[in-house]
Image (cartoon, rainbow, N blue to C red):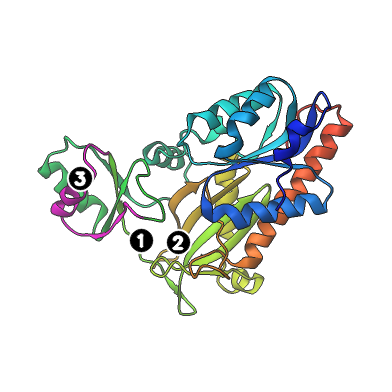
Amino acid sequence: MRDISQTVRKEETSQRIFDFAIAWDWEYDQDFVSQIHDYCLQRGLKPYLIQQFNLNETLQLISEDKIKFKVYFDRVADTDFRFLELAQLLRKNGTFFINDPDKIKWIDDKVLIHMDLTFHKIPVPATFIYYPHDEEPVLISKIKQIGVPFVVKPAHGVETGGMGVLLNGYAVEDIYQWQRQYKDFIFLIQKQIIPRIMNERPAWFRVFYILEKIIACWWNPSTHIYEAVTKTDVETFNLKPLYTLAERIEELYKLGLFSTEIAVDETGDFVVVDYINDQCDMRKKSKFADGVCDEIIDLIVNRLVEKIQEEVIMRENNGNNLSKM
């Protein structure tokens, strides 16, 4: 994969305009980023890749008005303040963001998201908020209200891949044990959803939203194995609420790409169990047993590049003015 960004300084033009830029820093994103890069080239788009090694150079080129991006996709965890500086520069230049940093900066706060979803009547598990100063009688009372087993989740993500979450909690001591491990954290204590079984599979789903397109997957919470949801599945098991709930979440947060976890409990109710993730794991199943189905990654990449091209054409027709992709 040839990164055109590496040759920018060799050009003598006053400003180079790239259709699309993507920032990434996770080694397992290599295939995903490469596929996006290749799809862009196939459609005649000019992509630009940003990593740690060329970040400072990119910041300088932008500040000197030597390069400009029409669309920007941030795949970087918020571990380097320089990427925040990059986003601020791009905003001033009128770049379109796939996921606007101003909209995702509080997505990580599960307490706020829980309150927001509850206010908008999106079904979520019965939950109470645990604070480090809560006393045992209060906790016992709250546990009785939500029932057992329960799940303990930090309000802010401390680890990835579902780590940092306690399953099958039954007593106050389970909460204290978790609190000792993650001191001073605020937790969500949630009723653990037991999924209905559909054709020998737990009715637990990962649902991806990608720029007005929704793609649902079966996702086994025990094995983390993905399977594509088919049209027949939707009809047979009445899974249309998966798509409706994803649409409602998008209406609230206006992100271009995110995933959410939704389960169907034993009574047949659809419940949003893991609210919203803007940094979706895009490893492919052909390489990783717990990866996303290859054909679904292909759909996501194709949709992303298709909409990037639409944005580029729209900007050209509008004199590079902002659109509402």
Q: State left or right for residue 112 relative to residue 25.
A: left
Tell me, yes or no, whether the highlighted magenta stretch contains residue 302: no
Q: Are marks 2 and 1 in contact (CB under 8 Å)?
A: yes
**Element at badge 3?**
helix
Nearest-to-viewer mark from 1 and 3: 3
Q: Which residue is mark 2?
A: 263
How much space separates mark 2 and mark 3, taking CA atoms? 27 Å
Q: How far is the residue under mark 1 from the one under mark 3? A: 22 Å
Residue 14 appears in the figure: yes
Q: Quadrant of the C terminus?
A: top right
**Image quadrant assignment for residue 30:** bottom right
Height in image: 204 above or below 306? below
Q: Is residue 170 covered in magenta? A: yes
Q: Which residue is mark 1?
A: 193
* In-image side of 117 versus 60 (left or right): left
Which residue type does callout 2 highlight? Ala
- Which mark, by number, is residue 179? 3
Residue 141 seen by the camera:
no
The mark nearer the N terminus, 1 or 3, is 3
Magenta span: 163-185
